[in-house]
Image: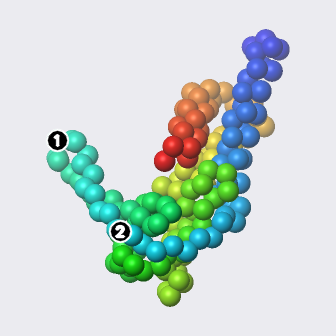
Amino acid sequence: MTKNQNKLQLTITGIFTLLALVILVDLALPGKVEMNEIVSINKSREDYNNAAGNFHYSYQIETTKHTFPVKEAFTNLVKPQDFVAYSVSRIFQEVNWYKVPRIGDEHTYSLRIVSGLVLPLLALLVFFIRYRFNIKMSTLVFVLQVLLIADLVFLLIY
C-alpha cells in the first residue's frame, strides 16, 4: 500500500470514527426532557414475508409533539390521556428514554440502544484494533462503515 493510499484510508477511518463518536455523544448527553399527553397508542402487525409467515407486533406512542416506538410492556402501563415523560436527544432529536411519571421506571427502546450505543461502540472497537495492531480486516471495516451510514440516515429520517 502506498503512502497516499494509507493517508486516504486513515482519513476515511477518522471521518467514520468521528461519526461514531457523534452518535454515541447524542445518546450519552442528557436530552431535553418533555412531558406530554398520550394521544394514541398504535399497534401494528409486522410481517416477515418468509415461508413460515411469521409476524410480530410493534407499538408506538403518539403524543401531542412526538411519535416514538415503545415496548409492548410499556403500552400495558399507559392509556390515552395519560402523561408520558421522555428525553429527546440534542443532535438527532430521537427519544432516548421514556417513563410514566407516576411509576418512574425509565424504559429505552432496544433499537435506540443498538443504533446509538452498540453499533458505534463496535465500530470504534474495530477501527481501534485495525489501527493499533495493523490487522487486515477491510471487509469488516467496510461493512461497519456502511452500517454507520445507514444508522446516520435512520437517525436523521426516522
Compared across the picture, whether 9 is left or right of 108 comes to right
Picture quadrant where residue 67 is located: bottom left
Secondary structure type for disc 2:
strand
**x and y, in percent, of residue 51 in the image:** 17, 41
Q: Which residue is mark 1?
A: 51
Q: Which residue is mark 2?
A: 40
* Of 133 and 99, the residue lying toward us: 99
| C-alpha distance separating marks 1 and 2 | 33 Å
Give the residue furthest to the front: 64
**x and y, in percent, of residue 30 in the image:** 70, 66
Name the residue type under label 2. Answer: Ser
**x and y, in percent, of residue 36 in the image:** 51, 73
Disc 2 crowd rating (10 Å Cα; few below 14, some 14-19, many 20+) is some
Compared across the picture, whether 34 is left or right of 14 comes to left
**x and y, in percent, of residue 17 in the image:** 72, 39
Compared across the picture, whether 76 is left or right of 24 comes to left
Q: Residue at x 58, y 41 (%)?
A: 152
Picture quadrant where residue 25 is located: bottom right
Q: Is residue 52 above or below residue 131?
A: below
Name the residue type under label 1. Answer: Ala
Q: Quadrant of the N terminus?
A: top right
* Of 153 and 67, the residue lying toward us: 67
Q: Is residue 73 visible?
A: no
